[in-house]
């Protein structure tokens, strides 16, 4: 049975990945800040006994992230998706240290520490996916007049982290990629977004399934096309 860890699994894309891989018969470790408060995760626990495990994980809490290997009980991870993320909108006049710090903590430090904690549980052929955003492309520099500056900077940083992790984990045969999910109807994406969770998750999971070791270090769209750095 293949095993996967997903962060931010209680709603949005994270819940979509959770449902997808449960449907494929995988053993799913669904990490969330408050798993006990999620009726959805509680229901999945009873519906998929033996396949579904809910873990408590705030990716911004270093001590909690460090406990991940023991929570995972030494399982070998075939796939991990660093999905948890936050996004604040703040115009130039109201930029604040608090917003930049919390955004970078959740969107960059979190995935970095998760990768550090779980990489010993990965084997040759395992895959680590960092959920990025087109907003993190320096070349595209989408809507620079808008207020998603801390978010865009955090995803650009996550992209570089992806490349650096890819180099570090390549000798161990682990593939690391950053994937832009597109604009998706979640709490973050809003109701006017282009894609449903199922559409985005369907494309991303197909792309993940077709990854080869040579793809390591790439920044990709949900359909596998190269996104410019
Ligand atoms: P969402 O519906 O807002 O869900 C975000 C998830 O992240 C929630 O489960 C949330 O948990 C979790 N989370 C936030 N901070 C966390 C922390 N410190 N520790 C652990 N979990 C935390 O957003 P989404 O659209 O599904 O986003 C998923 C990923 O896709 C994010 O990385 C986002 O940047 C990326 N993305 C989304 C879009 C889009 O259009 N939706 C576009 C590009 C990229 P709580 O319920 O506890 O808050």
Image (cartoon, rainbow, N blue to C red):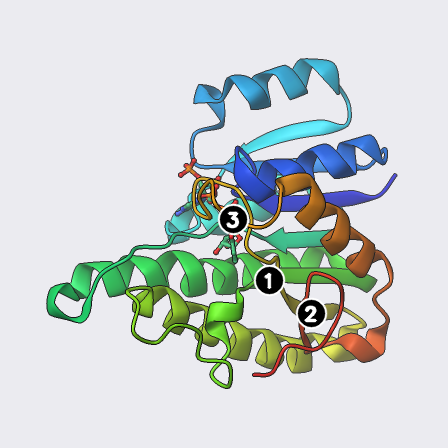
* First reached walking from the N terminus: tag 2 or tag 3: 2
Q: Earlier in the sequence, mark 1 or mark 2?
A: 1
Badge 3: residue crowd in 10 Å (few <14, some 14–19, many ≥20): few
Q: For residue 145, what is the image quadrant? A: bottom left
- Using the image, tell me which numbered label, if any, was put on residue 130: 1
State whether residue 78 appears in this view. no
Indicate the quadrant containing the C terminus: top left, top right, bottom left or bottom right: bottom right
- Secondary structure type for disc 3: loop
Task: Measure the C-alpha gap from mark 2 to mark 3.
Answer: 27 Å
Q: Residue at x 77, y 27 (%)?
A: 51
Residue positioned 67% across, 67% down in the render:
221
Which residue has dot 3 on it? 193
- Residue 141 visible, this orientation: yes
Q: What residue sits right under mark 2 in the picture?
A: 176
Q: Mark 1 touching mark 2, by CB under 8 A?
A: yes
Vertical side of 142 occupied by 194: above or below = above
Distance CA(mark 1)–CA(mark 2):
8 Å
Residue 180: horizontal and vertical position, in percent?
60, 63
Residue drawn 70% across and 28% down?
Answer: 52
Query: Residue 175, position in %: x, y?
Result: 75, 69
Indicate the secondary structure of the residue bearing disc 1: strand
Nearer to us in this view, 161 or 151: 151
86 on left or right of 43:
left
Mark 3 residue CB less than 8 A from any atom of ligand 1? yes
Viewer-side residue, 172 vs 189: 189
Q: Is residue 136 above or below residue 52?
A: below
Question: What's the CA distance linking mark 1 and mark 3?
Answer: 21 Å
């Amino acid at each position: 049975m293949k095993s996967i860890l997903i962060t931010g699994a209680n709603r949005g894309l994270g819940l979509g990945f959770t449902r997808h891989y449960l449907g494929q018969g995988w053993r799913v470790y669904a990490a969330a800040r408050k798993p006990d408060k999620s009726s959805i995760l509680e229901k999945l626990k009873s519906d998929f006994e033996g396949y579904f495990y809910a873990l408590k994980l705030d990716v911004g809490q270093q001590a909690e992230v460090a406990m991940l290997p023991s929570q995972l009980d030494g399982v070998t991870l075939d796939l991990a998706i660093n999905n948890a993320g936050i996004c604040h909108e703040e115009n130039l006049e109201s930029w604040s240290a608090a917003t930049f710090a919390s955004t970078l903590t959740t969107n960059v430090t979190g995935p970095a520490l998760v990768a550090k904690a779980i990489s010993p549980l990965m084997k040759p052929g395992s895959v680590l996916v960092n959920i990025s955003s087109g907003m993190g492309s320096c070349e595209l520099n989408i809507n620079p007049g808008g207020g998603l500056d801390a978010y865009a900077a955090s995803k650009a940083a996550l992209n570089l982290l992806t490349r650096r992790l890819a180099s570090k984990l390549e000798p161990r045969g682990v593939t690391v990629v950053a994937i832009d999910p597109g604009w998706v109807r979640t709490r973050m994406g809003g109701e006017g977004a282009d894609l449903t969770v199922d559409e985005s998750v369907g494309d991303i999971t197909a792309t993940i399934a077709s990854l080869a070791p040579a793809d390591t270090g790439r920044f990709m769209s949900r359909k596998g096309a190269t996104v410019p750095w």
